[in-house]
Each structure stands twice: as structure tokens, then as C-alpha cells.
Image (tube, rainbow, N blue to C red):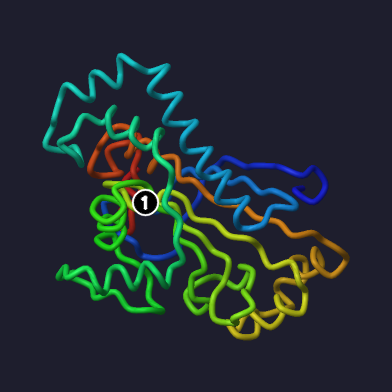
Amino acid sequence: YASALGKVYTFGPTFRAENSNTSRHLAEFWMIEPEMAFYELTDNMDLAERFLKRIFGDTLQRCTEDMQFLSDRPWDKQSTDEPIADVLQRVVDSEFARLPYTEAIDILSSSGVSFDFQPTWGSDLQSEHERYLTEKHFQSPVILYDYPRVIKPFYMYCNDDEKTVRGMDVLVPQIGEIIGGSQREHRLEQLQLRMRETEMSEKDYWWYLDLRRFGTVPHSGFGLGLERVVQFVTGMANIRDVIPFPRTPGNAEF
């Protein structure tokens, strides 16, 4: 659809296969996923930043009573002692910091902070790492990019260094990752190589390969979890409090 129309999006239920049982994860949630033709990684980051600022700006402008209600009640369930409206306004006014994953690892390793999980190149960042970058080091939202290829999916565009891919994560204070996305791999041979590396069956994904085999263009996209946005906007500490029927690993009560 993106190849035909240029810019498209979908919004619907999403299911998480991995066993992530934290205050930021649900087994079933709602996801907004745009995809844009002729977008490279920088274009993708620009759109993600504009998208978040528009959401938070509209919330502050159109939901003033709700924001005042939330700011006046420092419940123990909230993730911050600062009025949430002030947090959102600071995000809207800020310029998101952008840095490669490798630089983020260097910053974390030299921070002098005793993390529960030691940051090492080639491993995913933990919530404590994301919050340090956004709340302590930069004091603003952060966009990390150029992640190690070994920890990212096969469909992300491989950089010339053959070690990293053009993936990106947008991190915000209190929550950590709120958007994940990438420039997609549109080169057929490179895509087949990555599939072999990750032991995926080309036969099972014939349709995906055909989208590239018969012509495509550079393209990018990302996913924004609706409940994480609501969690951040309301200042709630647990994502299960911002969805009517929370479904989590091992729990299908509803």
C-alpha cells in the first residue's frame, strides 16, 4: 500500500509473542503503524518526533480540564511527582536528542551509575538505561538509531558497516521506549541473506520477497503503542491501568 499510495497507516489490535511481563507491556494492545515510501531513516525520525509533539500538544490544548485533574492529584500510582502537564509541555518544546546506539552504550558505560544490568554493546537496553538517558543525561526525549543487526529483525536495512541496521527507538522520560521503527530493507539479495542468517524459511515468506523482487522503493515506518501514549500522558505507573481489559502473559481473565 505504501508503494502505491506513498504514506499509509494502520491502527488495530496487536499481540506480543514474547513473555514480557512488566509495567510497560501487555500481551494484547493497540498499535498505530505508519509506513512511508521514499522515506529513509532520518525522515522516519523526523516524522516520529513531529507525531509525538502533535499528540502531546493537542492533549494540552484540548484536554485542559483532564490535565489539570491529573496534575492536581499526585497519586502514588503516578510515575512522576512533577505535574504531568509540565512534563508534556517540556517534551513539546524540546528538540529530541539523536545518537547512535554505540554512543549510548559509551555514555552509559562511563556514567559511573551502578545499573542492575550492565550495558554492553550487542544487548538490548533496559528500562533503567533508557530512563537514565532521557531523565539524567539529556533531560529530553532521545532517539537512538543504528542498532546491532544481531538484536534486530531481518527486515531492517543493513548499514555499510555490516554490523548495524537502520533501526530506531524513541525514548521519553518515565516510560522509556514509546516508538520503535526502522528503514526497511528493500534490496532483495540483502533481505535473503538476512533471512538465512536468522534461519527463516524463504518459502514461508515468498510473498514478502516478491514485494521486493518485482520492484520497490526505499521505505520506512514505525509503531506507536496507544496504551503507552496514554500511560505517559496520564502519568500512570502501570500500563494495566490505562486499558479497560488488560491482558498480560499468563492472564486471560477477560
SS at circle 1 = loop
Instruction: Please state, as top left, top right, bottom left or bottom right, where the C terminus lies in the image.
Output: top left
Callout 1: few (<14), some (14-19), or many (20+) C-alpha neighbours within 10 Å? many
Residue 152, position in %: x, y?
51, 71
Q: Is residue 212 above or below residue 98?
A: below
Q: Is residue 223 left or right of residue 111?
A: right
Residue located 26% across and 31% down the image: 84
Q: Is residue 190 above or below residue 21?
A: below
Nearer-the-camera pick, 23 or 150: 150
Which quadrant would residue 208 be assigned to in this image?
Answer: bottom right
Residue located 36% across and 51% down the image: 26
Residue located 37% across and 47% down the image: 141
Residue 69, position in %: x, y?
23, 19
Residue 78, position in %: x, y?
19, 37
Which quadrant would residue 42 be assigned to in this image?
Answer: bottom right
Residue located 48% across and 43% down the image: 30
Q: Which residue is mark 1?
A: 26
Q: Is residue 45 left or right of residue 68?
A: right
Q: Residue lying farthest top?
A: 65
- Residue type at mark 1 is Leu
Nearer-the-camera pick, 26 or 180: 180
**Count of numbered circles on the image:** 1
Q: Is residue 92 above or below residue 118?
A: above
Nearer-the-camera pick, 240 or 75: 75
Q: Residue lying farthest left?
A: 76
Nearer-the-camera pick, 87 or 2: 87
Residue 225, position in %: x, y?
45, 45
Q: Is residue 51 left or right of residue 209?
A: left
